[in-house]
Image (tube, grey):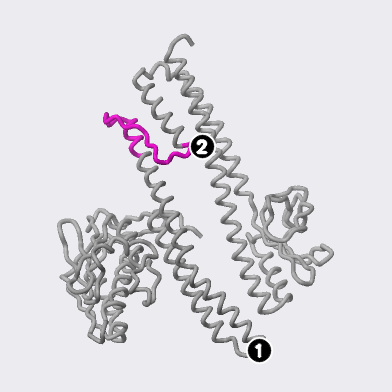
């Protein structure tokens, strides 16, 4: 212990162990919270389905549906009790006392036993939502939390193993670590401490030696930058949703009040309800688009790339939109070369080009003049360039970057249908393929250019898949 290397190794080991424990506890808590949130979402979806059954067929249909679901393999937790608390239907034999006393989601995981358990004294843990019916009956719909418990046990075991391995490695570290390496570790530990303290703008030091420490620091710095970008994107989306969805929600509420008023006066609320359904469908489409953009930007959308003949694919899309173009008084012109293959996701690139053609058709026709939408394909070095242009009013140069943001719409575009997410989705798809989107003046009109790497045949069949959120 009189050797500086030994003392510093022990010190760094202790500091690293503390940071590791903090990080593991944080990750465990975050993952557990995420799993619980997913369980609550699943429960909410099941409650919504049961509510539709109840509204359509009453209590008899509801009890029958619950009984059927409860008997399915791997079913969630279902329980129906009478006003006295006696179990009528379900797959739960016993509950922790007090679970059914309060309506709503349970504040914490509770203990329960199923009828299928051989040992009835063995209890599991679950979360659930309790609903009180007007006749005093209570319904419980829940999800088992056994996997979450296993996850926590696995993390604890991994932590113990990791600390044991670090203790063994510490016995040899003083023989291998020099003063220079110790100084670099000291700087990295200090930066890590600031990051764990909440300073996501901090970065690990890179000396330029291009050794293992520099490569690790560069990768972690890239990861931290992406985390900061995703957090900023999440904040932006939240702000945009709060701002741009307030108006449709207000319309929904006003129409619901109108429907209630018509029902009370003997009128027919059907038209107001149909308008509400149309408004709700529009909001659902908006959320679907947001979800896809988030998945694509975060790399969670499953992407199966293959060799695609872009000329043929663009010709098919143009043919698909020709009836719509004729309906709005426009025509689609294609400028496509011979067969041109690229390694891309046919589904995502098709959706991106569809959004561009759809946008172009909205703005190509003005003042009764015929609208012209041009779909072109060219190559430049290792890139294939897809462009969609129109002869509409175009977009001012100082606002072209803004229209790529989510929910951003020009004042003159707010009378057109849409949510302001089309170009954001196109940009996310381009980035997923390693490409980019550019907006130019078509003189007149707007030209949107989608540059994508052509890729080699060795990339054929490449699959980049990640988890898809429920």
Secondary structure at badge 1 equals loop
Residue at 42% over, 56% down: 236
Residue at 30% over, 79% down: 320
Q: CA distance from mark 2 to mark 1?
A: 62 Å
Read off the magenta span: 196-219
Residue at 64% over, 66% down: 47
| Mark closer to the chain start, 2 or 1 | 2
Q: Count the labels in the image.
A: 2
Q: Residues within 10 Å of mark 2 (few under 14, many from 20)?
A: few
Residue lying furthest top? 2
Residue 194 among those drawn in magenta: no
Q: Which residue is mark 2?
A: 23
Image x and y of residue 222, in percent: 35, 42
Please give the label number shown on residue 265. Answer: 1
Q: Residues within 10 Å of mark 1 (few under 14, many from 20)?
A: few
Q: On screen, 258 above or below 198? A: below
Image x and y of residue 155, in percent: 56, 39
Secondary structure at badge 2 equals helix
- Is residue 92 toward the left or the right of residue 33 in the image? right
Residue 208 among those drawn in magenta: yes
- Residue 60 or 113: which is nearer the viewer? 60
Magenta-drawn stretch, dominant element (helix, strand or loop): loop
Image x and y of residue 18, in percent: 53, 29
Q: Nearer the viewer, mark 2 or mark 1?
A: 1
Q: On screen, 124 above or below 277? A: above
């Amino acid at each position: 212990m009189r050797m500086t290397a030994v003392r510093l190794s022990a010190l760094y080991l202790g500091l690293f162990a503390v940071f590791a424990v903090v990080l593991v506890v944080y990750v465990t808590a975050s993952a557990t919270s995420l799993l619980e949130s997913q369980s609550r979402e699943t429960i909410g979806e099941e409650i919504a389905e049961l509510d539709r059954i109840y509204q359509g067929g009453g209590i008899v249909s509801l009890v029958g549906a619950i009984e059927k679901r409860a008997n399915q393999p791997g079913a969630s937790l279902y329980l129906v009790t009478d006003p006295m608390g006696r179990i009528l239907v379900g797959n739960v034999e016993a509950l922790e006392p007090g679970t059914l006393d309060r309506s709503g989601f349970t504040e914490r995981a509770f203990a329960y036993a199923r009828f299928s358990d051989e040992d009835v004294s063995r209890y599991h843990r679950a979360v659930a939502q309790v609903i009180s019916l007007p006749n005093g009956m209570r319904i419980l719909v829940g999800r088992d939390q056994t996997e979450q418990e296993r996850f926590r046990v696995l993390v604890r075991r991994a932590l113990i193993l990791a600390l044991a391995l670090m203790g063994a490695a510490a016995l040899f570290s003083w023989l291998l670590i020099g003063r220079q390496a110790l100084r670099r570790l000291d700087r990295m530990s200090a930066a890590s401490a600031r990051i764990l303290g909440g300073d996501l703008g901090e970065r690990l030091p890179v000396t330029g030696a291009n050794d293992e420490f520099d490569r690790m620091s560069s990768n972690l710095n890239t990861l931290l930058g992406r985390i900061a970008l995703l957090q900023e994107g999440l904040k932006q989306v939240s702000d945009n949703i709060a701002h741009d969805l307030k108006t449709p929600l207000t319309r929904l509420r006003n129409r619901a009040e109108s429907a209630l008023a018509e029902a009370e006066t003997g009128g027919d609320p059907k038209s107001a309800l149909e308008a509400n359904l149309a408004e709700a469908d529009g909001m659902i489409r908006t959320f679907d688009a947001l979800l896809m953009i988030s998945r694509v930007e975060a790399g969670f959308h499953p992407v199966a790339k293959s060799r695609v003949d872009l000329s043929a694919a663009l010709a098919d899309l143009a043919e698909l939109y020709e009836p719509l173009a004729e309906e709005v008084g426009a025509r689609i012109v294609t400028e496509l070369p011979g067969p041109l293959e690229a390694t891309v996701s046919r589904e995502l690139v098709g959706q991106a080009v569809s959004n561009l053609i759809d946008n172009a058709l909205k703005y190509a026709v003005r003042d009764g003049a015929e609208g012209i939408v041009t779909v072109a394909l060219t190559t430049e070095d290792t890139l294939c360039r897809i462009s969609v242009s129109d002869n509409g009013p175009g977009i001012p140069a100082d606002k072209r970057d803004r229209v790529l943001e989510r929910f951003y719409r020009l004042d003159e575009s707010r009378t057109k249908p849409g949510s302001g997410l089309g170009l954001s989705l196109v940009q996310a798809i381009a980035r997923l393929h390693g490409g980019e989107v550019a907006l130019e003046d078509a003189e007149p009109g707007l030209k949107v250019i989608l540059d994508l790497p052509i890729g080699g045949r060795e990339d054929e069949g490449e699959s980049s898949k990640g988890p898809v959120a429920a």
